[in-house]
Image (spheres, rainbow, N blue to C red):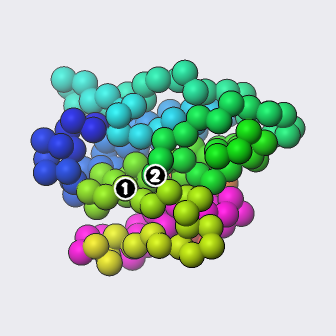
Amino acid sequence: LKAYLADQGDKIPYDQALTILQPIMEALIQVHARNLLHRDISPDNIYITSRGESRLLDFGAARFALGDGKSVSVILKHGYAPEEQYSSHGNQGPWTDVYAMGATLYRCITGSLPPDSVERIHADTLKAPSELGIHIPQNIEQAILKALAVKTENRFSNMGSFLRALTGRGSIQ
């Protein structure tokens, strides 16, 4: 996907981005149902086949979503990692992959990386896609911004909720 974006002038229309990312979001719903997290979602870990199908690669950072406070390795990709991933004791769960998927979608449609989540804790500098001249429906923009919420309690708690909001089958609240 990273190379594809470069070939397309660094960004693609929202509907095309969703066509690429929706199958991955659906697969992540199944991954999360097995109590696993990917923890490294970004355009360079999404492969587009010659038939136009998308695949999520590199489960090297994946781990069980224990939620028990046990220390885990800190693996992050700036711009794609939520603040809880910056700490070995951060409360990680499906919402961690939601943030990274939101960042990936944001990157696809705006051509820009979101600012690092830890830099947004005290003063959020994230620009809405509309502020960057990207025209998408307001509910889609709100869903992307909610997925990119710095605080986990303000984010979608799971990939299914995020996907339903993006496809108009669910609430952003």
Quarter in which the C terminus is drawn:
bottom right
Q: Are marks 2 and 1 in contact (CB under 8 Å)?
A: yes
Give the camera-side residue of 62 and 142.
62
Placement of 143 over or under 19, stated as above or below: below
Asked whether residue 163 is drawn in magenta, I would say: no
Give the camera-side residue of 116 and 103.
116
At numbered mark 2, what does the secondary structure look like: helix, strand or loop?
loop
Asked whether residue 145 is drawn in magenta, I would say: yes
Q: Position of residue 113 (x, y in %)?
A: 37, 56
Q: Give the residue displayed 57% in from the left and 44% down from the top.
A: 97
**Could you tell me how far apart the alpha carbons at marks 2 and 1 are, in whole angstroms?**
6 Å
Classify residue 72 as left or right of residue 102.
right
Which amino acid type is marked by label 1? Leu
Q: Quadrant of residue 128?
A: bottom left
Q: Work out whether residue 53 can be spotted.
A: no
Classify residue 86 as left or right of residue 20.
right
Q: Give the residue displayed 30% in from the left and 52% down from the top.
A: 108
Q: Quadrant of residue 121?
A: bottom right
Few, some or many residues within 10 Å of mark 2 (<14, 14–19, 20+): many
In the rendered structure, which disc, 2 or 1, sits on the residue that comes first in sequence? 2
Q: Work out whether residue 125 can be spotted.
A: yes
Placement of 140 over or under 67, stated as above or below: below
At numbered mark 1, what does the secondary structure look like: helix, strand or loop?
loop
Q: What span is colored magenta in the figure?
A: 133-155
Q: Position of residue 49 (x, y in %)?
A: 25, 24
Which amino acid type is marked by label 2? Gly
Classify residue 114 as left or right of residue 12.
right
Which of the labelled discs sits on residue 79, or is there none?
2
Q: Give the residue displayed 46% in from the left and 52% down from the top.
A: 79
Residue labelled with disc 1: 113
